[in-house]
Image (spheres, rainbow, N blue to C red):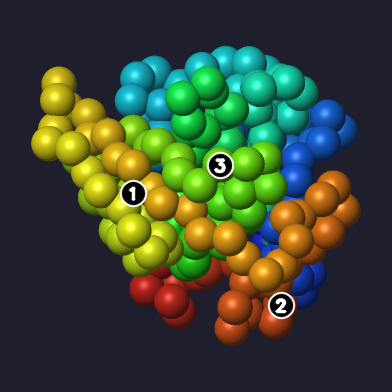
């Protein structure tokens, strides 16, 4: 059964923090609230089993998982896949939170984590039809280069910049800019609630 979205009247602050093993159920619930189109855009194929994805972002030794939370509900996940040549960034944002700067905050947190592990660039890959991913990267990153599409995929290289702020650790939080309290987008915002 499809999960219902968190309440539109929630007053909890949206926070961004590193995921822990105890966040596995939240990741699984968020996947249940994502549309098939959102999952297709993120995974470029059929969505993986919720337990597989949840395990990969909360407990895999080569993945740093970052979550965006509205109260007790996870609304976005960013992952930094630590590879030998360069870290790879990937993001999944629940449908009703897309295009609301959650992705930009996840990119910033992921960049902080990659820089803290010694990297100054990262790679990305997304479907050529995922124009939101391209727009997010162009608006959130200082320097980003894209390759021509190949077999329906676009690859990119993102130059990371060091920040004066320390990388986020388990338990630290960041508020979304201009959003002192979180509220689920609704019809009054021109979106389905």
Percent of width and height locating residue 112? 63, 54
Q: Earlier in the sequence, mark 1 or mark 3?
A: 3
Which image quadrant is residue 147 in?
top left
Q: CA distance from mark 3 to mark 2?
A: 33 Å
Sort mark 2 into few (<14), some (14-19) or many (20+) by Cα contacts within 10 Å. Answer: some
Residue tagged by mark 2? 181
Find disc 1 in the rendering and name its residue.
Answer: 133
Q: Is residue 134 above or below residue 23?
A: below
Q: Which residue is mark 3?
A: 119
Q: Are dots 2 and 1 in contact, CB under 8 Å?
A: no
For residue 74, say whether it is visible: no
> Mark 1: which secondary structure?
helix
Judged left or right of residue 121, residue 135 is: left
Label 1 to label 3: alpha-carbon separation: 22 Å
| Label 1 Cα crowd, 10 Å radius (few <14 / some 14-19 / many 20+) | many
State which quadrant residue 172 falls in.
Answer: bottom right
Q: Are marks 3 and 2 in contact (CB under 8 Å)?
A: no
| Residue 191 visible, this angle | yes
In front: label 3 or label 2: 3
Residue 89 as seen in the image, left or right of residue 8: left
Q: Nearer the viewer, mark 1 or mark 3?
A: 3
Q: Which mark is residue 42?
A: none
The answer to whether marks 1 and 3 mark residues whose Cβ atoms lie closer than 8 Å is no
């Amino acid at each position: 059964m499809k999960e219902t979205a968190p309440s539109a009247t929630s007053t909890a602050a949206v926070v961004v923090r590193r995921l822990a093993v105890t966040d596995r159920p939240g990741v699984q619930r968020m996947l249940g609230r994502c549309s098939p189109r959102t999952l297709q855009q993120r995974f470029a194929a059929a969505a993986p089993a919720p337990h597989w994805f949840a395990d990969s972002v909360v407990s895999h030794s080569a993945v740093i998982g970052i979550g965006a939370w509205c109260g007790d509900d996870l609304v976005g996940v960013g992952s930094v896949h630590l590879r030998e040549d360069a870290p790879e960034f990937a993001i999944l944002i629940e449908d009703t939170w897309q295009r609301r700067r959650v992705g930009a905050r996840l990119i910033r947190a992921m960049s902080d984590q990659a820089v803290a592990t010694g990297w100054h660039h990262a790679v990305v890959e997304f479907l050529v039809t995922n124009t939101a991913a391209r727009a997010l990267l162009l608006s959130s990153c200082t320097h980003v280069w894209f390759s021509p599409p190949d077999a329906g995929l676009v690859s990119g290289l993102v130059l990371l910049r060091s920040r004066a702020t320390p990388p986020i650790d388990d338990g630290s939080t960041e508020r979304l800019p201009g959003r002192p309290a979180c509220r689920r987008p609704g019809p009054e915002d021109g979106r389905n609630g």
